[in-house]
Image (cartoon, rainbow, N blue to C red):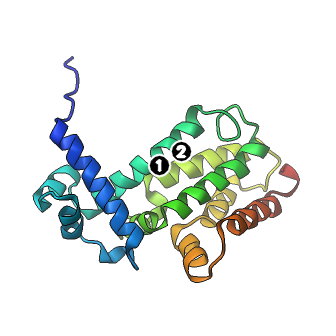
Amino acid sequence: MPEPRKPRKDAARNRAAVFAAADALFADCRSPEEVTMADIAAAAGVGKGTLFRAFGDRTGLIRALFEARLEPLGNAIEEGPPPLGPATPPPQRVPALLDALLCFKLDNRHLAQALEGTGADSPYRTEHYERWHSLLRDLLRRVPAPADSDFTAHALLAASRADLVAYLADEKGVRREELRDQLAKFTVAVLGDAM
C-alpha cells in the first residue's frame, strides 16, 4: 500500500498562514459572523480559491482550525499524566476535564462561537462534542453519580458552551479564575457524594 503523500511545503505554509489569520480575525471580531472567507484569505495572503480547495467552505475551515487548536488537549486526555490522563480516577478526572474545557473555550471563545454558530449542524452533533460527552458519560458511570449519566454529562458540558463563556467573560466581566471556581463548585453540586 502506498504511503500517504506529504503536503507540499507551500501548502503547509499556506495552511499555517490561514490558521494564524483566522485566529487573529476571530479573536479581534465583535461577532464571529463578521469574519468571511475573503477576510481570511486577504489576511493570510492567499487566494479565496486556496481556502475553498483546502477546506471546502467556511464551516470546514472553522472546524479544521478548531480541531487543530483542540489537538494538544485531546492528546493530554488520551495519553497524558494526571489529572487529565486516563490513569486518573473519575472523581478527580471529571472536574479536571471540565476545567480544561472551560479554559480552552475561554482562550478560543470566538473561534468556538463561530463553530457552534455555523448552523450547518447542531453543536451537539459535532465530533468534538460527542467525544467530550462520551468520555464524561463513561466516567460518570464509574462513580456513584446521578442515575442518568448521559443527561448529567450534557448538563455539565452546557456550563462550558462558547456562547455562555463569551457572555460571562466579555459582557459580564467575570474573570477567568472566578469562572473556573464557579464551574468547580457547580460540578461538586451536581455530582455531590461522587466527588
Q: Nearer the viewer, residue 123 or 176?
A: 176
Mark 2: secondary structure: helix
Q: Which mark is residue 73?
A: 2
Identified at 69% across, 59% down, the residue is 152
Identified at 81% across, 59% down, the residue is 188
Cα–Cα gap, marks 2 and 1: 5 Å
Task: Please tell me how crowded label 2 is: few (under 14), some (14-19), or many (20+) other residues with Cα within 10 Å.
Answer: some
Mark 1: secondary structure: helix
**150 relative to 120, above or below:** above
Name the amino acid, label 2: Leu
Q: Which mark is residue 42?
A: none
Q: Which mark is residue 70?
A: 1
Residue 36 percent coordinates (x, y): 25, 71
Quadrant containing the N terminus is: top left
**171 relative to 40, above or below:** below
Q: Are marks 2 and 1 in contact (CB under 8 Å)?
A: yes
Q: Nearer the viewer, residue 143 or 166?
A: 166
Can residue 120 be seen here? The reply is: no
Q: Nearer the viewer, residue 52 or 21?
A: 21
Residue 18 percent coordinates (x, y): 26, 55
Identified at 75% across, 64% down, the residue is 181
Identified at 29% across, 57% down, the residue is 61
